[in-house]
Image: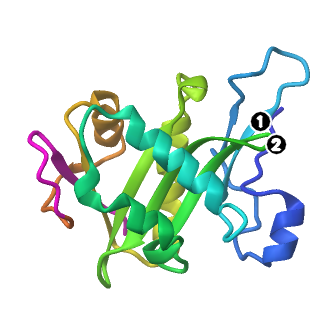
Amino acid sequence: MVEVLPLSAAAWERKGDAHASRVPGTVAPSPRSGGIGRTMIVIRRACFPADRAAVVAIWRAYLASTATDLSFQNNEREFADLPGRYVAPHGTILLADDGGTIVGCIAMRRVDDRICEMKRLYVGPTARGRALGKRLVERLIAEATAAGHAEMRLDVLAEFAAARRLYASLGFGDAPPVAVNPVAGTAFLGRVLR
């Protein structure tokens, strides 16, 4: 039996978070598990300033995973300003936490009164093959809907074919861009949330 916890009970108590209920689909078996005594990957909100270093580290891993130069995004400025545009209630950063090791992430930021943008979906190599990317996207969709967003948009590089298939399977289709991305072959996608 798998117990689903979006964040540790102690952390919920500290935060007084309204989303303290158990959320289906937020836990995946750990890639380091070997059977008995398995650890679980918990998808939780990043807490600032405590998680700042972990967020920057996993975002740097995401940037290193691509063959594309993404310096046009002014990443260092964004890192210095965290949580910046990802602050609640209209934004969030979610972390996939495997017993204290961050193995994945996804984020959302407000674009306007109706639209939010998904950013930085990344699952580290040790956690791949366990549908963690899908769980992260599904959790972010739930967070965006709860925050009152009507539509979610994103852009995805051509080299991320698996991510493109994932987005299509979750109902994302072609949509106008909400951010500048000059990289050839980038797809601009969106999905109605409510």
Residue 31 location (% of width, % of height): 68, 23
| Residue 189 sits inside the magenta stretch | yes
In this view, 93 is above or below 59: below
Neighbor class of circle 2 (other Cα within 10 Å; few <14, some 14-19, many 20+) is few
Labels 1 and 2 touching (C-beta < 8 A): yes
Which residue, given by chain and number where applicable, does mark 1 sit on?
40
Residue at figure coordinates x 73%, y 65% from the top left: 50
Q: Distance between the residues labelled 1 and 2?
A: 9 Å
Residue at figure coordinates x 53%, y 22% from the top left: 129
Tell me the magenta residue range: 180-194
Instruction: In this rendered view, identify the residue nearer to me: 90 or 102.
Output: 102
Q: Seen from this angle, which residue lies furthest bottom? A: 113
Residue 190 visible in the current orientation: no
Which residue, given by chain and number where applicable, does mark 2 sit on?
3
Label number found at residue 90: none
Foreground label between 1 and 2: 1
Could you tell me which secondary element the residue under label 2 belongs to?
Answer: loop
N-terminal label among 1 and 2: 2
